[in-house]
Amino acid sequence: MPSSRAVEVLNALIHGLDPLSGEPLPEGSVLHRAEVLRALLSAHDALQQAGARAQRRAQLPDNVGRSWSEAEQAELLAAFKDGATPAALAAKHRRTLRAIEARLERLGLLRPEQRMTRGGFSGVSETQPARRAARASATATRRTRRARQGPTR
C-alpha cells in the first residue's frame, strides 16, 4: 500500500469513519478508545515524517554521505587550485557546499573563517569566530577585574 493511501486510511479512522465507505463507525467500535486513537495518531505522524524526510532527501545531491575516494579528492584539490569556486565544485562532485568546504578545510586549503557554511569538518561550530573571540576576551577582562578587586562579601 502506498504511504499516501495509508495516510488517507489513518485519517478516516482517526475521524471515526470507515475508510472505504466514508460512513461513521459504530459508537462501540474499538477505534473510539483513547489508547487506540493515540496509536493511530502516532502512526499518522510517523508516516508524514517519513514522507517529509524522503522529500528532503530527494532534493540533496547524489553523493551526500558517501566517502571521498582518493581520485575524487585529488580532482577536488586540482580544480580548487585552478580557481574553481566551492559552489562549482559542489555541483561537479554532486555534494553539498558544506561538504566541499569541509573537505577543503581538512586539506588545509580553506580556513574556517573563509567558509560560507557553518561548522568545521571536525563538527566544531565556527559560525562566528570573531564574535566568539570577542566574547572570550570580554569574559577574561571581567575575570581580571574580579581578581583585582578581591573576594566579595
Image (cartoon, rainbow, N blue to C red):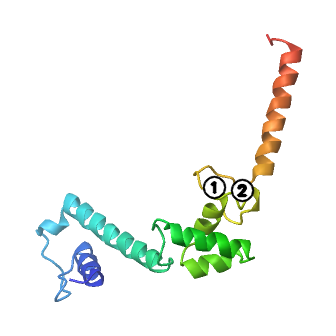
Q: Position of residue 69 (x, y in %)?
A: 49, 68
- Residue 86 appears in the rendering: no
Q: Is residue 48 left or right of residue 71?
A: left
- Residue 113 appears in the rendering: yes
Q: Position of residue 142 (x, y in %)?
A: 84, 28
- Assess disc 1: are there few (<14), some (14-19) or many (≥20) residues with their C-alpha within 10 Å of its C-alpha: many
Q: Is residue 8 left or right of residue 56?
A: left
Q: Which one is in front, 117 or 93?
A: 93
Q: Quadrant of residue 58?
A: bottom left
In the rendered view of the protein, which quadrant contains the N terminus?
bottom left
Residue 120: mark: 1
Q: Is residue 50 left or right of residue 130?
A: left
The structure residue drawn at horizontal position 46% and vertical position 65%, both measured from the top left corner, is: 67
In the rendered view of the protein, which quadrant contains the C terminus?
top right
Q: Secondary structure at mark 1?
A: loop
Labels 1 and 2 touching (C-beta < 8 A) = yes
Q: Amino acid at mark 2?
A: Pro
List the residue tagged with mark 2.
112
With respect to residue 149, does 49 lie above or below? below
Q: Amino acid at mark 1?
A: Gly
Q: Position of residue 147 (x, y in %)?
A: 84, 17
Instruction: Give how far apart the Cα atoms at labels 1 and 2 are.
Output: 7 Å
The structure residue drawn at horizontal position 66% and vertical position 73%, both measured from the top left corner, is: 78
